Image: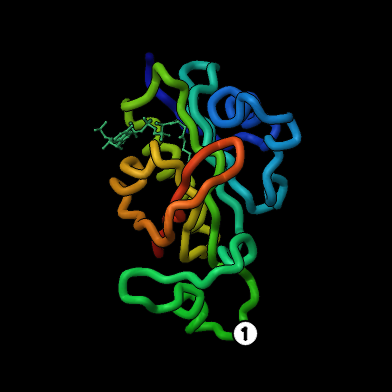
Amino acid sequence: MKNIIIKRINADETRGLRKKLLRPTQPNEKLFYYGDDFEDTYHAGAFDDNLLVGIASVCRENKSQSTGSPVFINNKENIQGIINKNKPNDNTPKSWRLRGMAVENEYRRNNIGSKLLEACIEHIKKENGKHLWFNARLVAVEFYKTFGFEITSDIFEIEDIGPHYNMEKLI
Ligand SMILES: CC(C)(COP(=O)(O)OP(=O)(O)OC[C@H]1O[C@@H](n2cnc3c(N)ncnc32)[C@H](O)[C@@H]1OP(=O)(O)O)[C@@H](O)C(=O)NCCC(=O)NCCS
């Protein structure tokens, strides 16, 4: 492994690793995520030379759009309330969702996932986002905790993938 470079990629470039590492048994239409082609969506790719070895995507999406459930953090305040309190009439979502985070097996535990997530968070900050949330696979929970994300749901099952938690934090 040489120096790993993180670069912005397009949605089509994510699909090979999404299939291989995240959804190997699912039909190809499941590799197309909500928001993939929004102008401000960011897809990060980790490259070892020209080889794509890791991916992560973030798009603007309120948590309630997807889950319909209220959002709470430690102090039990409503995150949307915190996010919108300075601009109550601003309808632009300040929440972003992380999806499709994966690193090739033999490249794991080399800080590549961290670099991808850092690049995503940098992008969100530039876009004035304030909150990042996602459905975390059980196997990835410890990784996300190293970034200070907190579990904010009971465990739930996503069909054909397995058990997940919601995780989130203000950024
Ligand atoms: C989750 C994933 C992206 C992490 O990528 P990675 O490049 O291995 O992560 P990093 O090397 O940046 O890990 C940073 C820290 O997170 C923690 N961490 C990462 N993977 C971990 C694991 N499997 N178990 C426990 N802690 C882990 C460690 O503290 C690690 O630091 P260390 O290696 O110095 O101990 C990778 O394991 C993966 O692709 N998993 C399969 C796909 C998946 O489940 N994606 C998440 C979907 S929600």
- Labels in figure, total: 1
Quarter of the image where ligand 1 sits: top left
Q: Quadrant of residue 52?
A: top right
Tell whether circle 1 marks a residue whose Cβ is less than 8 angstroms from ligand 1. Answer: no
Position above or below: 129 against 24: below
Secondary structure type for disc 1: loop
Which of these two is toward me, 56 or 64? 64
Q: What x and y, as percent, mark residue 40?
A: 64, 53
Q: Quadrant of residue 79?
A: bottom left
Q: Amino acid at mark 1?
A: Asn
Q: Quadrant of the C terminus?
A: bottom left
Residue on which the image places disc 1: 89
Identify the residue at horizontal 31%, vertical 70% (top origin): 74
Q: What x and y, as percent, mark residue 146?
A: 28, 46
- 103 relative position to 143: left or right: right
- 116 relative position to 110: left or right: right
Q: Quadrant of the N terminus?
A: top left
Position above or below: 83 against 150: below
Position above or below: 91 against 167: below
Identify the residue at horizontal 53%, vertical 47% (top origin): 157
Which of these two is toward me, 155 or 129? 155
Mark 1 Cα-neighbour bin, 10 Å: few <14, some 14–19, many ≥20: few
Identify the residue at horizontal 45%, vertical 41% (top origin): 137
The way the protein has been coloured in the rendering is: rainbow
Q: What x and y, as percent, mark residue 24?
A: 61, 24
Which of these two is toward me, 15 or 69? 69
Q: What x and y, as percent, mark residue 141?
A: 36, 44
Identify the residue at horizontal 63%, vertical 50% (top origin): 41
